[in-house]
Image (cartoon, grey):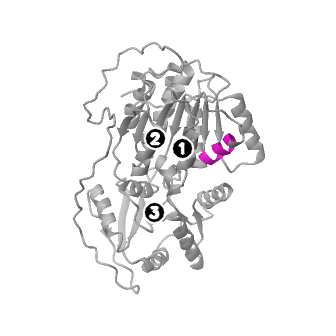
Amino acid sequence: MRFEETYLNDNILDALYDMRFDEMTPIQERCIPEILDGYDLLGVAQTGTGKTAAYLLPILSMLDDGDYPKDAINSIVMSPTRELAQQIDQAMQGFGYYLDGVSSVAVYGGNDGGRYDQEVRGMRLGADMLIATPGRLLSHLKVGNLDLSRCSFFVLDEADRMLDMGFIDDIMKIVQLLPKNCQRIMFSATMPPKIRELAVAMLHNPVEVKIAVSKPAEKIRQSAYVCYEPQKLKIINSIFKAGDLQRVIIFSGKKDKVKDIARSLKQMHINCGQMHSDLTQQERDEVMYRFKAGQVDVLVATDIVARGIDIDDIRTVINYDVPHDAEDYVHRIGRTARADRDGEAVTFISDTDIYRFQQIEHFLGKEVEKIPLPDGIGDGPEYIKREKKRSNKRHNGRWNSRGNGSKNQRKPRPKTKPAKDGANQKK
């Protein structure tokens, strides 16, 4: 489906034309019409599917068309990290190139006092779009720097990352300050029970759009070592002695493990940095700068780096532990083999992670090559295949999943856009 077949206004379409955007991605095709029609929406899609445009384009179009108050915060986009907030802000500047009357302000931590004062002035004057991280936005709310009572659109991006980083309570405090008629949109790459609970609490009769997780790029050479936990550092030492140390990311699911790995690598005289939520924003910016500049060979990180960070020349990804699900696995190894480059992904499978990795292999539709352990570190556990137990659990409640096989389909869309009854009124 082409962008020009939607209700997006001409100013948005002109910007898309200049950017050479013509055909919509599946998530955009499913979400843009629903958001333009005023529905709350729950989108389940991985990074890289075009979901940022899926919510920014319709909101910007409506802000440009509508008579929204100039002295209010008319829309909010919440991001779990400063890096993703910056990328959303950059995308907004591109899509909104011809929107002279639409203003925006980005609010996130790690800045000096001068930037904070600019944020305060921007919010008090009013902004059509506010792009923010939870902690920074809450700090402004606590001191009365902004009022959300007239907000018309609220977007929660990367909800599962918000959960992992402990932001859900902060998000709910913000949601409770929104007016009831505020249109709410939520995106998540995965849908664990706590995220579905959040969706139930935050959204009103939402349209649910789920885009299947795509398989990893064929250019990624995937392999694995079946090993015991104490053997993992010895395997890393063997890998690094045999090959090039440059442009490597090592992922672990826990920040304490990241600290331990980085400490051990430094004892091996490996030039490495670490990224996790205990670092200040300034420290994280410094680590990312040094890694991108080639001053650090190996980056040890939690999944905070697996999504929303654009580094095109990663050669190797090492999963120090098996990710929780196939989505996280795809996101992690997707850091390599970008921009038409080749890449390698290596996973360490401990005896307690064998069944979890078999579930990932089931998703991939193939068995990942198992590499023999290096000489001198002993034998690893046996990779025994187990049958997946059948579950009888079913989700409670009924969701409106138009376009997802549900019989509750809305009537066909008219070919001309209906007239608005009011700028902030849902259609």
Q: Please rate how many residues cluster around mark 1, counting C-alpha atoms within 10 Å: few if below 14, some from 14 to 19, many from 20.
A: few
Where does residue 362 sit, x and y in percent of width and height? 27, 58
How far apart are the two marked residues, 1 and 3, measured between alpha carbons?
35 Å
How far apart are the two marked residues, 3 and 2, measured between alpha carbons?
37 Å
- Compare marks 3 and 2 and give the one earlier in the sequence: 2
> Which residue is found at the position 54% from the left and 54% from the top?
166
Circles 1 and 2: CB atoms closer than 8 Å: yes
| Residue designated by label 3 | 317
Q: Is residue 393 above or below residue 187?
A: below
| Residue designated by label 1 | 172
Residue nearest the viewer, comparing 240 with 167: 167
The residue stretch that appears in magenta = 133-141
Q: Is residue 65 above or below residue 247?
A: above
- Compare marks 1 and 3 and give the one earlier in the sequence: 1
Report the amino acid beneath label 2: Ala
Circles 1 and 3: CB atoms closer than 8 Å: no
Q: Describe the element under mark 3 as helix, strand or loop.
A: strand
> Which residue is found at the position 55% from the left and 28% from the top?
152
Report the amino acid beneath label 1: Met
Mark whose residue sits in front, 1 or 3: 1
Residue nearest the viewer, comparing 294 with 236: 236
Q: Is residue 388 left or right of residue 19?
A: left
- Compare marks 1 and 2 and give the one earlier in the sequence: 1
Q: Which mark is residue 201?
A: 2
